[in-house]
Amino acid sequence: MIGTVLVTGGAGYIGSHACAALMEAGYQVVVLDNLCNSSLVSLERVGEICATSPIFVQGDVRDRDCLDKIFHAHTITAVLHFAGLKAVGESVDFPLEYYDNNVVSSLVLLAAMQQAGVTNIVFSSSATVYGDPPSVPIREDFGLCPTSPYGRSKLMVEDILADWHVANPNWSVCRLRYFNPVGAHPSGLIGEDPQGFPNNLMPFVAQVAVGEREKLFVFGDDYATADGTGVRDYIHVMDLVEGHVVALEYICRQPGLHTINLGTGNGVSVLDMVKAFEHASGQSVPYEIVKRRPGDIAACWADPRLAETLLQWTASRSLAEMCEDAWRWQQGNPRGYA
Ligand code: NAD
Ligand code: UDP
């Protein structure tokens, strides 16, 4: 299915990499982003990578007029819906902002798509919908019990999409549950650019390695894991966005409601990540063990077999590649896009 894809949140970390992957696969791309957590420079860089930039519309997904204008001006065949707020801790302090942005935007988007006759949507969900799983690896049929407003906003949208699909069985709806996206485009031109203090491990480690921060705080070394630190399923952002391209092609052939984990199936501890990053960068990453971060779970990794079966997709890039690519981005852009 080659055509024009609307990418909401396309100037952000995952969205900008998705734009590059879509354009390299031959799609035309229209980005809608309000730039609340991103910079337009990311899309200029996508233009350098792909020789042509995506069409950019600055606006909010909750703005129905803006969406209607986009659907009127372009023949959109599918939507990748990345736009949203994503900081777990912030969502505890500002739950209304999270429900408003993440849930309302999805409602407005679905209504606009319906009016425009666009029936293919891929939604960015998250492994956070599983909460603290009873066992690992996590399969898509595990119980869902998110522990933060952010996670609940993702689950609400998943439920809305399921109800919507019951009422509109001709639609193709894909709910992709990402594990921990890290790394950067191999060009080093685009990557993760957290505003202020990074919440996530990999950007924090990268900022320590490049000398922007003194040391990493490791949140707990008394978990029931091999080295006591938290274990996650880190997936290279390029693998993740390639997963979106194949998911898009799959759902366009296969109307239905699809729910798929995107992960590697490998668990990596905080200290494994520190070692891998030190190796990739040749820099030391000093760290201090501090107390556990409230709400954190010990271990979480995907059972990625459904993606393999349905999409013939598996994550192929190693932890070393994730660190090398993140390091190239970090070295070339020590202050991000600023
Ligand atoms: P990001 O913040 O880098 O990108 C999100 C983009 O959406 C930003 O460019 C922001 O400006 C834009 N945006 C936010 N609200 C908007 C609105 N109402 N209208 C228009 N634009 C809006 O985040 P990301 O890491 O690229 O994440 C993309 C999606 O993937 C999010 O929905 C996030 O919840 C989900 N996700 C991310 C991770 C992760 O670890 N990065 C993990 C699981 C799921
Ligand atoms: N972590 C850490 N120090 C940090 C950030 C994260 O020790 O500064 C740990 C965290 O406790 C977890 C892992 O790194 O075990 C991944 O955390 P991240 O916030 O990146 O992802 P999430 O917890 O949302 O899966």
Image (cartoon, rainbow, N blue to C red):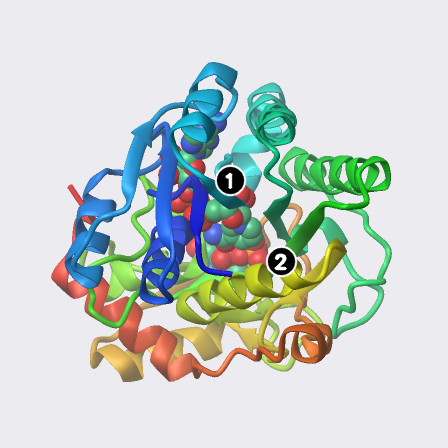
Q: Is residue 167 visible?
A: yes
Q: Residue at x 61, y 46 (%)?
A: 121
Q: Is residue 15 left or right of residue 80?
A: left
Residue type, label 2: Cys
x, y percent for residue 174: 67, 53
Foreground: 133 or 251? 251
The residue at label 1 has a CB less than 8 Å from ligand 1: no
Q: Which residue is mark 1?
A: 87
Foreground: 199 or 251? 251
Callout 1: helix, strand or loop? loop
x, y percent for residue 28: 35, 51
Quarter of the image holding residue 136? bottom right
x, y percent for residue 45: 18, 53
Callout 2: helix, strand or loop? helix
**Around disc 1, counting alpha carbons within 10 Å, would you say few (fewer than 14), some (14 to 19), or many (20 or more)?**
some
Q: Residue at x 72, y 49 (%)?
A: 129
Quarter of the image holding residue 140? bottom right
- Residue 164 is labelled as none
Q: Which residue is mark 2?
A: 252
Q: Is residue 216 left or right of residue 106?
A: left
x, y percent for residue 19: 36, 54
